[in-house]
Image (spheres, coloured by chain):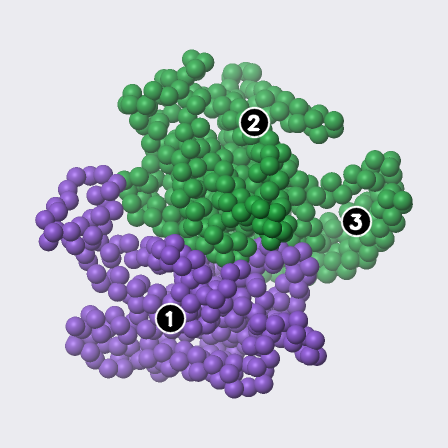
Chain colours: A purple, B green
Amino acid sequence: METLLISLLNGLVYGMLLFMLASGLTLIFSMMGVLNFAHASIYMLGAYLAFTVSEYVGFFPALIVAPILCGLIGAAIEIWGLRRAHHNGHIAELLFTFGLVFIIQRVVQMTWGMLPMAYRVPPSLDFPLFVLYGSNFPAYRGFMLVISAAMLLGTWLLLKKTRVGLIIQAALSHPQMVSALGHNVPRVFTTVFAGGCVLAGLAGVIGGNYQTTEPGMADSMGPIVFVVVVFGGLGSLAGCFVASILMGMVQTFAVVIDYSIADLLRPLGLAISGDTLLTEVLTVPVARIGALLPFVMMVTILFFRPRGLMGTRDT
Amino acid sequence: MKSRWLILVLIAAAIALPWGFYDWSHHRHDGFLISVLSQTGMMIVLALSYNMLLGQAGLFSLCHATFFGIGGYAMVHFLNAAGHDELPVPMEIMPLLAGLSGLGLAILFGAMATKQRATAFAMITLGIGELMATAALMFHHFFGGEGGVTTDRMIDNSVFGLTYASGIQVYYLIVAWTLIAVALMYFLTLTPLGRMANATRDNYERAQFIGYDPRMVRFIQFALSGFFAGIGGGLYAITYEIVTFDALAAPLSANALLMAYIGGTTVFGGPILGAILITLLQSGVSLLSNSWLVYVGVMFIGMVIFAPSGLAGIIQAHGPIQRAGRLGRLTVPYLRLVLPALALLLGFVGLVELMSFLTIGAAQGKKLILFGNPIDVHATVPWVVSSVSLVVGGTWLRFEAAVFHRVWERLSAEVSR
């Protein structure tokens, strides 16, 4: 029972962190048709910038400053890079963001070094929030939940209740029409791209001290976020939310499940022994293949529903 | 006619190069050279098979190394089986088996991935690549976990009676198979399939309209490119006698992309050029500098923005002017580009190296030494020199590039008239 509850909470925290990243990616994608491969790199930049800024002014100002810096970087990427690449077609845009991954990765290594940073949870949030069946739930995870929920609410309000959101939504589906009505669509694009990068940066600020701030963090986070976006359905924010939470749960629950397929088959009277590839696949405990599960889930859903969970369009 | 000569020269060079550096006093081949050349051979196969997707079918795949790696792993198991006399296949045919393994896996994954195109295809292949890379670390039976699987290539079964004990014999096997694979891939571009792949790349709706199933075209193209990548992987396994997780991980997929794109995706020979260039640079520069990836990344992004047809595309663009006999008039504008480009390069490399020695180099305890003089990375002078060189070179280059552009436009207009 206690493992269940704790894992549920942890899964929620991780899922919300994933959603912060995946929502920005989905927004950018559905708007511009560009998959930003460098999204996880911006997440990493957010963590590193937050570390450096918090060295000088403390964690809470960094919570605001670092995402804004990431947003500015994103705007610069859009204006001076993506727009130029856009003339050469969609594949060129993809390739451009793909190239950025290498550059950001190495620039981070050159600026901050190869070793993990000592980016820690701020002391004011470093206490157990409550005790559940004898295990502590850190206050910082609660704080992460609050921040990501606030961001979810904020994005939703911005998109649904403001004029800017209305234009963004319209430009999502009918960019030519919006442009014909006299709106500056390129500027809307820049705004959305920068906005996505702000979200990624924010995720970096609160995720950097939840996980570790090191040069490999973009590589470890990137594929998962892409899996989330594909699983939820390209271009669907709701699907993206469901997929993020699901993926967070799967990843945290996988760690605590120590059963294998062979254990399931045993009550049926099937005993598995021997030393072949098949028996290895059948007897490996779920806890060991946790990292594999998201990709297996993605391949499975693509097999049955090529558009993903809630996707509405092909690309 | 001209390209035929170029091909012959390349083949002759591939065969003759090891003997150019033969150590006659010790009767030994230059091991480093042989290994670089062998590496180049497999990378050519990898880059060309990748271009079957990116250049010819317009598919941006991120799991190409999966098929290369599977070819390698399968090869190791085939060689081990042959070593135990369980697989009576001569060494010369072995790469074909590796290719078939790649083909099998590509059929399986291709059935899923080619349902989509463009961006969705890229993401699905990313997922597939990660799936296989993660699985390779987890399942020890086939993949051997982090240590990889090893083999012994001396299986004592050869059509020509060779033992393949020395690198040079393996190298010529690689040359032969590279030639076979390149020729096959070239002939594929002439078949209706190759033409239809181009058509679905340019306008899939119209291809659909005249009665072809673009998905089927994508699928066959994907499967065949997996076949050739598998051959490349088989050659890899024969050369190194060990295949680890690196052979199917994402960095190699990215490498295939870089080679194909920098070389040029619009010309068949482009990826060959890219593979040779990148492999040579990799074995040269990556030993000298920590920041090798920054240079490749910047070169790649520069290509994406300024020269989307790659190096081969740039060379090809000179064709009409050269045929008109006016190439000479470009000499002076080109020469004027050299100095500012050098200044820009110097400034950029200087800044990158200074930064990298400040952090990574310091952690490794290395010192930046230039022409025998150690350089203090904390001093202001090198930073200022590099920055000034970067800014001045950049501004100057923009000016000269505009001049060059005007001459180029005028020449192209004259030639086309």
Categorize mark 2 by other alpha carbons within 10 Å: few (<14), some (14-19), many (20+): some
Instruction: Tell me the subunit letter for badge 1.
Output: A
Q: How many marks?
A: 3
In the image, residue B190 above or below residue B211: above
Q: Position of residue A190 (x, y in %)?
A: 62, 72
Which mark is drawn over residue A242? 1
In the image, residue B234 above or below residue A109: above
> Residue placed at 70% from the left, 79% from the top?
A182
In the image, residue A93 above or below residue A188: above
Instruction: Tell me the subunit letter for badge 3.
Output: B
Regarding mark 2 in the picture, which secondary structure is present there?
helix
| Amino acid found under the numbered disc labelled 2 | Leu
Q: Position of residue B149 (x, y in %)?
A: 33, 36
- Label 3 in the same subunit as label 2: yes
- Which quadrant, please, contains the N terminus of chain A? bottom left
Q: Compute the Cα span from label 3 to label 2.
A: 37 Å
| Amino acid found under the numbered disc labelled 3 | Leu
Instruction: Tell me the subunit letter for badge 2.
Output: B
> Residue placed at 24% from the left, 56% from the top?
A286
**Which image quadrant is residue B311 in?**
top right
Q: What residue is shown with label 3? A: B337
| Amino acid found under the numbered disc labelled 1 | Val
Q: Earlier in the sequence, mark 3 or mark 2?
A: 2
Regarding mark 3 in the picture, which secondary structure is present there?
helix
In the image, residue A180 above or below residue A313: below
Q: What residue is shown with label 2? A: B179
- Label 3 in the same subunit as label 1: no
Tell me whether circle 3 and circle 1 mark residues in contact (CB < 8 Å).
no
Q: Position of residue B262 (x, y in %)?
A: 63, 45
Q: Position of residue B321 (x, y in %)?
A: 83, 40
